[in-house]
Image (tube, rainbow, N blue to C red):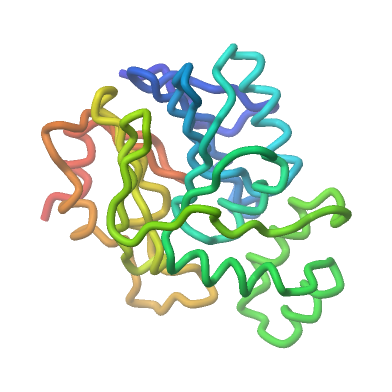
Amino acid sequence: MSDTDEQGTTGIEFHHVAGRVWVTPFDPDPDWVQPSVALIADERGSVLVDAGQSPAHAAEIQTALRAAGLPEPRWLVYTHHHWDHVWGACAWPGVEIVGHVTGADLLRADAARPWSTRYLREQVRANPRLGPSFRARALAMDSWDGFTILPPTRTFTDELKLPTGVLVRHVGGHHAPDSTVIADPGSGVMILGDSWYPPPLHLRSPDDGPDLPLVRRLLTDDIDWYVSSHSPTMTLDEARAAVAE
């Protein structure tokens, strides 16, 4: 088994999955909405997968990065545009942000919104189904000063290969139209983000569930480990058993 520990902790640490892939723990508290963040470490410039759910979360990730002696990221890849994966991006200056073209349009629209505690409250009054998500956003933000949402600076449509050999692939799905998976073939690891999850709560119907057919399409003998943002990491055998019909 990997030495990845994906239970909520006080203080964030990077744990080794395999090869050059490291991951921070997700927080299992559903009210906190803090996903795991992965790093594909390379001396030529590491690839950070997702930015953290806030600048404060990103700062904790940066502290953990230095404590582990891991190389600083040169690229930041978004698995999708949802707030808990991108709101920490403004705390990562100097990185190239990579994301799917669909997500770029959505993030530009989000960036134009007047984000503040007052704005969150107004939106929940107008649409109470937004309550869980918007309350989590308010909890995540220590301060709105200097906060901005950053769309990707480099977009792709289907697939992209970064100079370090990391593969970025658009898969779409029910959770988000721009859902993207990131694979490091040499390490035998695929990072799934939220790609197989149901739609967000405010868009979910009673019949919505995990997108198991999407996962089945992604399973391959070339990948030994599957990392999700809010779920424990699985081996290939565990993933196959979980999606078996």
State the residue in front, 108 or 242: 108
State the residue in front, 183 or 43: 43
Query: Residue at horizontal 44%, vertical 20%?
Result: 42
Against 235, residue 194 (above or below) is below
Against 88, residue 213 (above or below) is below
- Picture coordinates of residue 56 (x, y %)? 76, 41
In the visual, does 222 lie left or right of 14? left
- Picture coordinates of residue 45 (x, y %)? 50, 25
Q: Which quadrant of the structure image shows residue 182?
A: top left
Q: Residue furthest bottom?
A: 126
Q: How many marks?
A: 0
Query: Residue at horizontal 40%, vertical 24%?
Result: 21
State the residue in front, 215 or 166: 166
In the visual, does 205 lie left or right of 64? left
Query: Residue at horizontal 43%, vertical 65%?
Result: 101
Q: Quadrant of the N terminus?
A: top left
State the residue in front, 12 or 8: 12
Query: Residue at horizontal 65%, vertical 31%?
Result: 61
- Picture coordinates of residue 201 (x, y %)? 51, 70
In the visual, does 240 lie left or right of 18? left
Q: Quadrant of the C terminus?
A: bottom left
